[in-house]
Amino acid sequence: MHTLSLQIRDIVGENVNLCYQCEKCTSGCPVSLEMELVPAQIMHAAQLNLKQKILSANSIWLCASCETCTTRCPQGIDISKVMDALRIIARREKVKARIPSVPRFYNLCLLSLRLVGCIYEMGVAGFLRMRSGTLIKDMPLAKEFISKGKIRFLPKFRNVKKINRIISRVKKYESV
Amino acid sequence: MKYPFYPGCSMHSSAKEYLASFQAISRYFGVELEEVKGWTCCAPTAVHGISPLLSTAIPASNLASIEADGKDCVMVPCAACYSRFKCAAHEIAKSKETAKKVNDCIGYEFKNSVKILHPLEIYNEIKHELVIKELSKINVVAYYGCLLTRPPEVKQFDDCENPQSMDNILRMIGLNVIDWSFKTDCCGATFNLTNKEVFMRLTGKILAEAKKAGADIIAVACPLCQVNLDSYQYEMKEPNIPVLYFSQLIGLAYGIDGKELGLDRHFVKCEEVIEECLKR
């Protein structure tokens, strides 16, 4: 069984052991305020192989991939990619997400890519709002989006075959 | 000048006014835009949290078809698509193994020879001397968001902490550009769908800071930032600040009709704000 740091290196090629806890990532992170483990703590926990601690915190699902941490890390660690790797590990190992709407959003986007060839915004947004129980509250906004032509009511199919061909070939190398 | 041009999904839906204004100013400057044939989705946000290879292969397949068409560059106005394209090109250049896998997945020997351009780079080079409309009474802040500049070694676009390209353009076309500290702060991306509270805090902060800096308008270059900053203001107590694409402001300065620029398509009404500023 691989340690967490090796797993991360396998998936995104980043070495978390380079981190020396300067906390620049955390100071710049726009969502560290809401995180149970801030980015520097995630890096430390990854070094210590504390997988459960990381995957059971809300942090990886709060990361917006804004890449401020990546930009500022003096060790050149792409922390945003480390977060990606952790989300991928959580997905592969079927860990229950602390903020389930995020992996749900990911799955819907992938499903949409497969069926429509692009992100069917109306379907993805509608389904997520339905699950979060805010569909009715957001109806007026949705109506305005539709009336302004800012969102399509029906999906626009775009090169579905080509996308699916790529997905099926990617599966040779990675689980999708 | 003729540029191959990749619109991406949003420019045909939520950001139609970005497309319209971009096409209008391109016509004005004699830049010909040629939509890339058979383009697919760029595989945004969610995909790199599922499969890094897939999030590289899909944009690479688009770049590959541009390359196969004999073109050496592509214009990508959507910051999210621009980011995916640049990241894919970077990953492929960085690792032979990734390049080999990607080639296998897309069924093409990709040489990575396509230069990826953002319109800000083009319009920064034009000398804006023939501006028609006097806009100096409008105070504006330029908001770049995350994806245009970060990470810097991938994007190679402007300064990542204090970018200037949009500021320069806006200044050249005569607007009063205000310096502020939130140019590259995160707008919350897709969190409007998944973490609404966090999302409202992030957009609220940016809007409040723009107001505090004295801005009448926020200028953006990303469809996602535009939607996020514009469409949820009605839920907030204070902010009532229009969020316009930089291309719309360029169009305005050159006297292009507001309707053609899609100024009426925003949630926060901007035409009245502009009128009021000009009366000052």
Image (cartoon, rainbow, N blue to C red):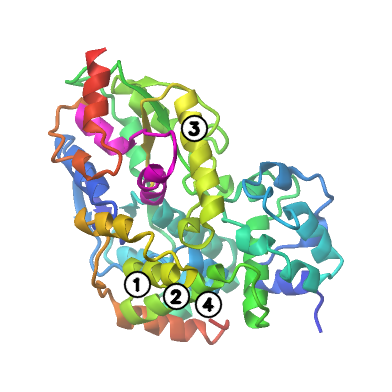
Identify the secondary structure beneath mark 1: helix
| Identity of the residue drawn at 87% across and 66% down | A48
* Residue A9 locus on image (x, y percent): 72, 69
Quick one: B248 or B151, which is closer to the camera?
A: B248
Kindly indicate whether the residues beneath marks 1 and 2 are on one polypeptide chain. Answer: yes
The kind of residue tagged 3 is Ala
Disc 2 is placed on an element classified as helix
Chain letter of mark 3 equals: B
Q: Picture coordinates of residue A175 (x, y %)?
A: 57, 83
Residue range (magenta): B223-252
Q: Nearer the viewer, residue B197 or B118?
A: B197
- To which residue does mark 3 refer? B208
Q: Please tell me the numbered disc located at residue B101.
A: 4
Give the Cα separation between the discs numbered 3 and 2.
33 Å
The quadrant of the rendering that contains the N terminus of chain A is bottom right
The residue identified by callout 1 is: A123
Dots 1 and 4 on the same chain: no
Q: Residue B120's x, y, as percent?
A: 36, 38
> Chain ID for label 1?
A
* Label annotation for residue A22: none
* Residue in the picture at 57% in, 81% down: A174
B187 vs B158: above or below: below
**Disc 3: CA contacts within 10 A as few (<14), some (14-19) or many (>=20):** some
Kindly indicate whether the residue at mark 2 contacts the one at mark 1 (C-beta within 8 angstroms): yes
Which residue is depicted at the point 80% across and 65% down? A46
Query: For residue A130, what is the image quadrant?
Result: bottom left
